[in-house]
Amino acid sequence: MIINNILWVQDSIKDDTKLFLNGTLISHSDENFQKLYSVLCKTDSFKKFRNGSKCEIFIKGRGGQKSYIIKGKYSNLDENGRRIPFMAYINNVKSLQEAKDELVSISSEHNFEIVSDDISVSVEKKRNLRITLIMTILIGGAIGYFVFTRVASITNKTQKATIETIDSISLDSLNTK
């Protein structure tokens, strides 16, 4: 069985949850239902991806092909007015953006909608992080330069005062003879 994506949805309190494998609804009586559901729950071998998203995002793999588990809530509401929870496993993608696009696609096939800000895959956040890092380095450098020049100035004044004191002691000792 090739798994490209698994989607679990609890769209109603009264009905059973729904599980889709590659877009096909899997019956609760199907022997694979529990195996597929367990794939969504086993995040311990995945690394949690922190990016300010309202969803929990887990990643496994490096480089070319990665797998993602995304847990969150749709903008759709259940009969009690609560956002509908989902869990998705997206396999064989190169980036979180691709996983997000796949999740949006398979969700819309089943009339579920994701608030785009809930899964924030933002280049701007990376850019803001870089800007913050650069600003921290520049401010740190400026403070370091200020402290260095202050200490150097104080040291220079102390050296001059010491030399003047030594000179005056030397001159005083010569004058007393």
Image: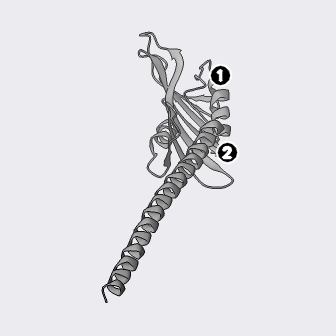
Mark nearer the N terminus (1 vs 2): 2
At horizontal 48% and vertical 20% (from top left) the residue drawn is 84
At horizontal 49% and vertical 50% (from top left) the residue drawn is 47
| Relative to 159, residue 124 above or below | above
Q: Which mark is residue 27?
A: none
Q: Which residue occupies the foreground of this view, 44 or 54?
A: 54
| Relative to 32, residue 141 above or below | below
Residue matched to label 2 = 93
| Residue 93 on image: x %, y % | 67, 45
The total of numbered circles placed on residues is 2
| Relative to 77, residue 65 above or below | below
At horizontal 52% and vertical 57% (from top left) the residue drawn is 145
Residue type for callout 1? Ser
| Residue 1 on image: x %, y % | 62, 45
Q: Which residue occupies the foreground of this view, 170 or 121?
A: 170
Q: Which picture quadrant has residue 21?
A: top right
Residue type for callout 2? Val
**Residue 116 vs residue 33: left or right?**
right
Q: Residue furthest left?
A: 176
Residue matched to label 1 = 108
Judged from the image, the secondary structure of the residue bearing numbered disc 2 is strand
